[in-house]
Structures are given as C-alpha cells and as structure tokens.
Amino acid sequence: MLFPYKLQTFAAMYIHQHTCISAQQTFDAIDLNTIKESVNNKLLAIEPKYEGIPPGILRRMGKAVRLGVGTALPVIKNNEGIDGIIIGTANGGMEDCIKFLNQIIDYEEGMLTPGNFVQSTPNAIAAQTGLMAANKSYNITHVHRGLAFENSLLDAMMMLKENPEAKYLVGGVDEISAYNYNIDYLEGWYKKEKITNTGLYDTASEGSMAGEGAAMFLVNNNNVNASAQIKDIYTIHTTDVLLVKNALTVFLKKNKIAPENIDLLLNGENGDNRLLKYYTGVESIFHQRTSIARYKHMTGEFPTSTAVALWLICHGRLPAQMFKSGYPGTTMQHILIYNNYKGIQHGFILINK
C-alpha cells in the first residue's frame, strides 16, 4: 500500500528549558528511578506548592490551569521577552466547565458564579499564563484531542520560520476530570479490573490507566546550549496499521535517516491490547540495535502525554525501568517518539540530542 500523502517541510527548532509536573517526581527534586504507584487505576499529578502563584489567585484556579501555569512560570521567570505562548490541550479545565453547566440548572439561569466559567475554557491555561507573566504577545491554544501537543509544536515551528529571532513557550496540559473519566471508562478506554501501573504492560485486556500532567518548553532557532533539537513532526489519522508503517517509512526517508540509525524509540504503549498492533507494527520497522522504551506506566494515558515524553528525553538519561529492549546506557542521538491515541490519531516526533 502506497503512502498517499505529501509531508510538509518545517525548519528544526531547539529546546532550551523544560519543566514538568506529572504523576512522578518530575518537578523540583526530580527522581525518575522511584515509581509512584497508581491509586484506583489513576495516576494523579504530584502538585507542588506553586510558590510563583499568589494564594488568592491559586485558590480560584481549576486543576488544569494550576498544572499549566505552575509548569510555565518557572520557564518564563528565567527568560525575558518570550514572543508567544502556545498550549496544547484536549479538554482544558473540563471539571470547571461541568460545575458551570450544573450552576445553570441549579440557579435556573440566574446569578451564576463567573469563576468556573472563566476557568473552564481550554484557552484559560494560555490566557492565565499570559496574564500572570504580563505577556501580550502571540497567545493560542490547540485543541486537537490526542494530537494537541504535536500541533502546538508544529505551530511553534511555523512561527519560528516567520520570526527566526523569536522564542516561544510551548506546552501540553490535561487533567483527569470526573466527567471525562466516566465517559472514557464507559467507552472502554480504561481498564475494568483493578491493576497497578507497575504491571500495566503485563495485562492482556482492553483499556489503559488514566493520567494527567503538564510539560512546558522554551523553543527557538538557536542551537547553542540546547537540550535537544526537534527535527520534524508528523501526524496522521487512520486505523490502518500498514498505513501507519508506510507513513513512518516516508517520514524517516524525508528526514534522510535510516531506521537502523534511530537509537531510541520511545513509544506510548499503554496496556490496551487493542492498540498493541500499532506499537508492534512501528517497532518492526527498526533495527535490532534500536532501543525501545515506554513511558505510560509513569504518566498514565491522557491526550497530551507526549509532552511529558518529550520532557523525559530532554531531561537526560532514561531510567532502566522504562526500557522494553535495548540498553539504557548507550548513546541516544537520534530519537523517535511515537504515540497513538484511541486507535486513530498517530503522532511522530523526531528528536536529535
């Protein structure tokens, strides 16, 4: 089967600073070797004290906004003159949205509390970050379900192509809301049986484990002292495994890199046996020397989990418990992140270290 789509060409960009709040200890005293175990099939974010957010503002923030702003402020604090804030999220503050909709019924469309409404829109994260940083530049939110973060990165690449001297804050944020969790649970996207994240890949059943988190990155065109280079990104919607494999082959060929030269494949395998065919299909393309690692036993499944995956790559050497095959001590220069969301959205992020 021939791959029918032409891939766009974007200039590579560089990551210079990165922060992350997730279900593991990825903020402040970072510890990736000790795995925090899930509770009731959920991996909840370990929230810090949010010292950069005034208490009066913090107590009015929904969880997604707290996660996003709390992750973004340390990056902004260390970098003046950021030329834009680009955030990817599938749902934003869905919990506050439901609270507001319930108020409409409870108060019979009378005097409603505006706080829940303000915090409920997906663009509240980028907006609050811009307000707190007094940043009046480009401010946008991409809401594309499982490809929201990938589209944010593509946006940043296009902006840097137009503004080569600029620098942007790019991030991905999503929370576990009771509303979304219940819908996805009833649709079979989360496991019915009780498991722990440490045994996520040992289960042969449908569904995964819910997660949440946020990761932020400062990107520009300057390669000096960069943590990593994002060389290219590609996304595709399909349920055809063969088309996914063909897309990856074309994507690598376009970037003039052979599969055997990829040092690490970091994939989003999530314990759902229905999606395993996509991950094994992608893995089959690579040479035996390519190490394969997984990350969702640390983050759980959520639409913008690839933001945390990218943070893991930028942070440095991955812990041994992430590796499915290969040796974690080898040099990782050419890295590919592959993720699948709900069997239809596929994203590839090609990284050079």
Image (cartoon, rainbow, N blue to C red):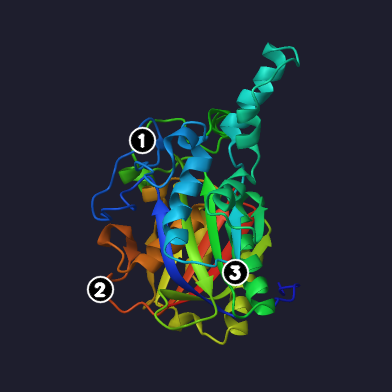
Name above or below for residue 219 compared with residue 118: below
Q: Which mark is residue 245?
A: 3
Between discs 1 and 3, the one toward the N terminus: 1
Q: Give the CA separation, mark 3 to mark 2.
A: 28 Å
Question: 341 or 57: which is nearer to us?
Answer: 57
Kindly identify the residue that appears in the image at 48 percent across and 71 percent down.
336
Q: Which mark is residue 78?
A: none
Q: Nearer the viewer, mark 3 or mark 2?
A: 2
Q: Where the C terminus falls, by quadrant?
A: bottom left
Kindly identify the residue that appears in the image at 45 percent across and 54 percent down.
73
Q: Residue furthest front?
A: 134
Q: Where the N terminus falls, by quadrant?
A: bottom right
Instruction: State the residue position of label 1.
Output: 195
Kind of residue at disc 2: Gly
Between discs 2 and 1, the one toward the N terminus: 1
Other-residue count near label 3 (Cα within 10 Å), few / some / many at <14 / 14–19 / ≥20? some
